[in-house]
Amino acid sequence: MAYRAHVIISGTAEETQQVKTAFVDTIDALGLAGEVDVQEAVDITVAPRGVEAIVYPDVTHYTDLTPADAQLIAEEHLYKGRPVEGLIFREREVEPLDTPATKEVRVVLRNVGKINPENIEEYIAEDGYAALGKALTEMTPDQVIAELKTSGLRGRGGAGFPAWLKWTFARQAPGDQKYVICNGDEGDPGAFMNRRVLEGDPHSVLEGMAIAAYVVGANQGYLYVRAEYPIAIHTLRIAIEQAREYGLLGQNIFGTDFSFDLEVRMGAGAFVCGEETALMQSVEGKRGQPRTRPPFPAVSGLFGKPTNINNVETYANVPQILLKGGEWFASMGTEKSKGTKTFAIAGKVKRTGLIEVPLGITVREIVYDVGGGVLNDKAFKAVQTGGPLGGCIPEKHLDLPVEYESLASVGSAMGSGGFIVMDEDTCMVDMARFFMEFAQEESCGKCVPCRVGTRRMLEILESICAGKGQPGDIERLEALGQYVKLGSLCGLGQGAPNPILSMIKHFREEYEAHIYDKKCPAKVCRALIEYKIDPETCIGCTRCARNCPVAAITGAPRQPHVIDPEICIRCGICAQVCPVDAVRVE
Amino acid sequence: MEEALAITDSIIDAHRANPEALVEILREVNERRGYVTREDVHRVAERMDLPRSKVYSVASFYSLISLEPLGKHVIRFCEDAPCHVAGGREVWEALEQELGIPFGQTTPDGEWSLLTTSCIGACAVGPVMMVDDDIYGNLTPQKVGEIIARYRDAETQGGTA
């Protein structure tokens, strides 16, 4: 079927369907069904705006579409060849996804948003499964490992352990029954890279897992995906069915004696199940609590058998490495952190969304070049990398290259790739409280230092934000942080204090202001700010008093008004309605 | 009672009463019924030859399995950092105000439960909430009111939102 044009649509579920239907119906009515193809993708561009569509090959980007707009575009642009100017998104040019200007190099994301994930033939057309074929028919397991070693691929889930070495351990472990597992329990707040790969290019992961299974000697695999990713699960199930139909999964793949099949297993809402031993417990039908290591999963993992477990992104890199060579991958990145990495940019930045860049790019480049800079051009304050188990990078480290070792050296971590940008209006004590709340919520409870330590740290942070901080609180947080790190069995407990400790390290004055001066410099913590009316500016229009939900403002008409701080609930409505901007927050 | 447990039985059967599938089974019961009852726990234990304490310990561990009855519509609002940085606090307050209950509770008429959830991976469009199985992003206090109103209107008209 030779289509001359493609329309790719994305948006929130309900409205997207209506727009898609309008496109399809109009295209059919105009007799274009064989010439124009309409597809859905999820989050096609960096800054989603309503229902969007991109018409290829023109790369015309339409946003905020209604069904009527879809009909118009089909008639004018697709039928008559005249793009509809009024609907085109002009605020920013949409560049083809891979250009030097964007500094992106899409390896793992190369097909996402471009192919239909529910059609295996589109994946195959992009060299899909060629790597598996090559591995099975032209390479020995040791040769595959050698290629991986040259590539320098490190586990992309966050630990950064060399992939070739992990596979080697599982390969060498004695045993007839072995497993491969894909960790799709992406739970880091701010991270959604794995979700997009599973939704948009599931076969790349299946292929990577099959290659791993060939190398380690496994015949069965599990894809553990969190239940909060229903689209990913749906896409994976279809992909697995199609791969089986095409003989790419199942018995005697590519006519060799290698057989491999896999199934999807769903999580049930527990962040700790992203930890590999907890994940295996969950697959076995138990509480997701981590266990001691050694023994490592490679030796004794799922059901006590040798198991290779890697992150979604790690597997997704493997086919490209085998096809283009380990040296190609190693030509990108830095000496110890080779290749590319996906990052999810969120928070106070102009362009949120997913990117994939060679490692070694600086934090500044990611925030300003790729991310477009801080939202509303406010002052940059910090970036949280590595999610709730990572640390913050303040302005003075903006030129730090993003790689495993350098991030760790400033008290942060690569993690799975979350990148939360914070500006001058973010309170670093409030943020620490948020991260600790998450850790507390998700702690499995097995280790006392984690279970109780995170609660105590949270209590201290809450009291500081409420204006009840005590001298010595910072030191208590630092000490508790050390105990929690040292006494915890898994990465959750070991990492939970990191955000707080790094924020204290880089923003200690802010903590001291909260405790000693009872002030919140970023004007976030309600208990520590006061709304005041500037008597010089106030014109006495009484609008604030009339809108105050708790009647905290008094004043006669045309006289300066006054807010009673005892009654005021800091809702900010007075500041919003004041016509002369007389309400100040201190 | 037996009727209600027929759901549980069919789910157990679909998984061939395999103890490995315990987490999946309980999650599916939760999905179908809205939560997991004590009778469900007992039935699962009996049919799968597991101690009740074990089934209960798994059911109480995972956040998508609820042992408490929930409202007809369940709102799960992301309470994590990226959504918070994107303006989550105002939306949080709007939700509590709109439904008239604090987070963690169900409205007296049994229509709405207001819960928090950990990150669901839609951070680029935060603040985010799930209403039952649907995800809503780019939330503002105003949008929250509109979304809830849509569900309420659908109720009075006897349809679905």
Image: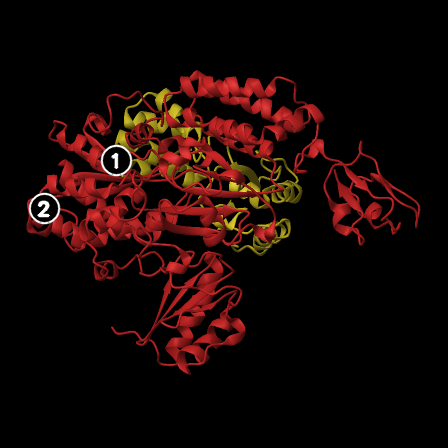
Chain colours: A red, B yellow
Q: From mark 2 to mark 1, how far is it between C-alphas?
A: 20 Å
Could you tell me which residue is drawn at 16 percent across and 50 percent down? A132
In front of the other: B143 or A541: A541
In front of the other: A401 or A19: A401
Point out which mark residue B77 bears. Answer: none
Residue A377 position, x and y percent, is 60, 52
Q: Quadrant of residue A471?
A: top right
Q: Nearer the viewer, mark 2 or mark 1?
A: 1
Which quadrant does the C terminus of chain A fall into?
A: top right
**Chain of the residue displaying label 1:** A
Q: Is residue A571 left or right of residue A486?
A: right
In the displayed orientation, state which residue is furthest to the bottom: A80
Say how many tags the image has. Answer: 2
Looking at the rendered structure, the kind of residue marked 1 is Pro
| Callout 2 crowding tier (Cα within 10 Å): few <14, some 14–19, many ≥20 | some
Could you tell me which residue is drawn at 48 percent across and 37 percent down? B118
Could you tell me which residue is drawn at 44 percent across and 59 percent down? A45
Q: Which of marks 2 and 1 is nearer the N terminus?
A: 2
Residue A334 position, x and y percent, is 32, 43
**Chain of the residue displaying label 2:** A
Compared with B113, A71 (above or below) is below
Q: What element carries label 1?
A: loop
Q: In this view, does A135 lie to the left or right of A47?
A: left
Residue receiving disc 1: A162
Q: Is mark 2 on a helix, strand or loop?
A: loop
Point out which mark residue A139 bears. Answer: 2
Q: In this view, does A121 lie to the left or right of B73?
A: left
